[in-house]
Image (cartoon, coloured by chain):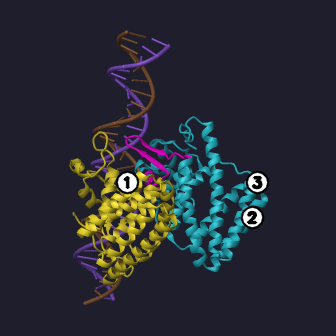
Chain colours: A cyan, B yellow, C purple, D brown
Amino acid sequence: MQNDEVGLIGGRSEVYSGGARMLNAAAAERLREMIVHGSLAPGARLNERELTALLGVSRTPLREATRMLASEGLVDLLPNRGARVAALNVETVRHTLAVMGVLEALAGELACANASDTAIAEIRATHYEMLADHARRDLDSYFKRNQAVHLMIIDAAGNPVLSQLYRSLNDQVRRVRYMANLSQSRWDQAIAEHNDIMDALGKRDATRLKVMLADHLAHKLTVVSQALTAIANSASAPGEVDTKTKARKA
Amino acid sequence: MQNDEVGLIGGRSEVYSGGARMLNAAAAERLREMIVHGSLAPGARLNERELTALLGVSRTPLREATRMLASEGLVDLLPNRGARVAALNVETVRHTLAVMGVLEALAGELACANASDTAIAEIRATHYEMLADHARRDLDSYFKRNQAVHLMIIDAAGNPVLSQLYRSLNDQVRRVRYMANLSQSRWDQAIAEHNDIMDALGKRDATRLKVMLADHLAHKLTVVSQALTAIANSASAPGEVDTKTKARKA
DNA sequence: TGTCTTTATTTTGTATACAATATTGAAAAC
DNA sequence: GTTTTCAATATTGTATACAAAATAAAGACA
């Protein structure tokens, strides 16, 4: 009876062995996506009754999922008051991007030293596809490819710990993306930066790559800060975004 | 009936509001400690029945705890086969230390720029206490103070994201500490390095501090690698430590 | 009207019950 | 003696039941 919606869960990319186990992982994945995409806004309460209905799982795997997301920093747990989507203020994002910066620098260094030519070729291919997205003004596809390029560079470093950590932090920041509107000029600039990044990586010029990645990230920080500040100013609580709004059933 | 042992849980430093809620957090803390201290060896299965008896909680908060530890990377989850303490091989530790290296460098940079004189003074005081531990050959106390100094430097950077991440990675590496025996010469060398680190921080010389921290970490990697390799050679599975041993009821 | 109390309702935290998968061990076959 | 098969057992995954706390709602009183 409660299992009717199980088919929905984890129906993206991962396939589970027998029937439909690992409901906690599937629920975590869906919640993570909802949080990153903003359909669960920062500060929103995670009502267990609502979410069990929405996800079609019982409270046990749902709670396991929220606990995992809490350890990832996407959710805050309040004693006897359940879980809330972690707030998203400018300070936290600044701190997160600072850490991501040194992780990217490390990745750049290692990628230049260790990445296979094949791996770099694949990154370059995706880079070109991203240029195509830009030419077509296809923002959604651009965002996806942009993410892909960055993650591929990180993965090219060949350090799984680095990869996992970066992804976790990246999820935090991605939440802002869906609030910030990219201006045309900033978009063009980002493309130029990506060309430089790709060029440095192709030449395995670690020093330049690190500088380029740092610049790129610094600009991202500017954009994201502006977006968050703008939203915070139009909302009640300064520094926090939309503490009240609660996403329901969609 | 099952709640008899609740008093034991979380009995270290944290106090919970009303009665004894937050059993998941308490259980996670105890399990984390057991894993870090090696009483739950790498590869050991986390039998839910045993652990509920040991911790005095039911399976629900216990499972929430293991899921949190899984997100922290201390535990691996196997579908339908429960949780195991994450393996600890040389490669993983190398990758972890590489990331910790850039985090320490960032912390050094930020600490030199931002730390209050009071904070640095407190670090220096702990540093001296550590020297006293060394003089007394009090290894246990030394390890604690050594950890404290490193964490204080990280925290002095004033970046909570950095602090939390570093602690999480640090827990991974700490597990090796309890396997590795510190040689006298290495101990003396570590003390010398710490003196340099303290000196650079006192002068807020970020460039030198970063070099010192990097050297210190590189030496740690050497020690840890040797320890892990030695243990791996004396065990069956190369690259992994003690996959069989299971800690029971103590 | 406003605010304070007190009582219902909801929601969370924990324990347990049930179902499905994995593991173990003994008997049978080779 | 070794391997295979199949039942018995144990263990995990999920759902639900119960208890405690928080929230909401109603009523009392100024």
Q: Which mark is residue A185?
A: 3
Which residue in the structure is indicated by mark 1?
B64
Q: Which residues are the magenta region? A: A65-89
User: Element type at marker 2?
Assistant: helix
Does A194 sit left or right of A242 as displayed?
A: right
**The magenta stretch spans residue B37:** no
Residue at the (60%, 65%) spot, across then down:
A151
Question: Can you give x and y, in whole percent of width and height, for residue A133 in the image?
Answer: 74, 61
Res. A122 in view? yes
Are the two marked residues, 2 and 3, in contact with CB atoms closer than 8 angstroms? no
Question: Can you give x and y, in whole percent of width and height, for residue B173 in the image?
Answer: 38, 68
Q: Nearer the viewer, mark 3 or mark 1?
A: 3
User: Element type at marker 3?
Assistant: helix
Using the numbered discs, state the Cα–Cα distance from disc 2 to disc 1 in whole angstroms: 44 Å
Asked if marks 2 and 1 fall on the same chain, the answer is no
Question: Can you give x and y, in whole percent of width and height, for residue B105 in the image?
Answer: 49, 65
Image position of B230 with respect to A179: above or below = below
Q: Residues within 10 Å of mark 3 (few under 14, many from 20)?
A: few
Q: Nearer the viewer, mark 2 or mark 3?
A: 3
Residue at the (55%, 69%) spot, across then down:
A106
Are the two marked residues, 3 and 1, in contact with CB atoms closer than 8 angstroms? no
Question: Can you give x and y, in whole percent of width and height, for residue A230 in the image?
Answer: 64, 42
Residue placed farthest to the right in the image?
A135
Using the numbered discs, state the Cα–Cα distance from disc 3 to disc 1 in whole angstroms: 47 Å
Image position of A59 with respect to B181: above or below = above
Residue placed farthest to the front in the image?
B203
Image position of B82 with respect to B23: above or below = below
- Residue A241 sits in which quadrant? top right
Q: Quadrant of the C terminus of chain B?
A: bottom left
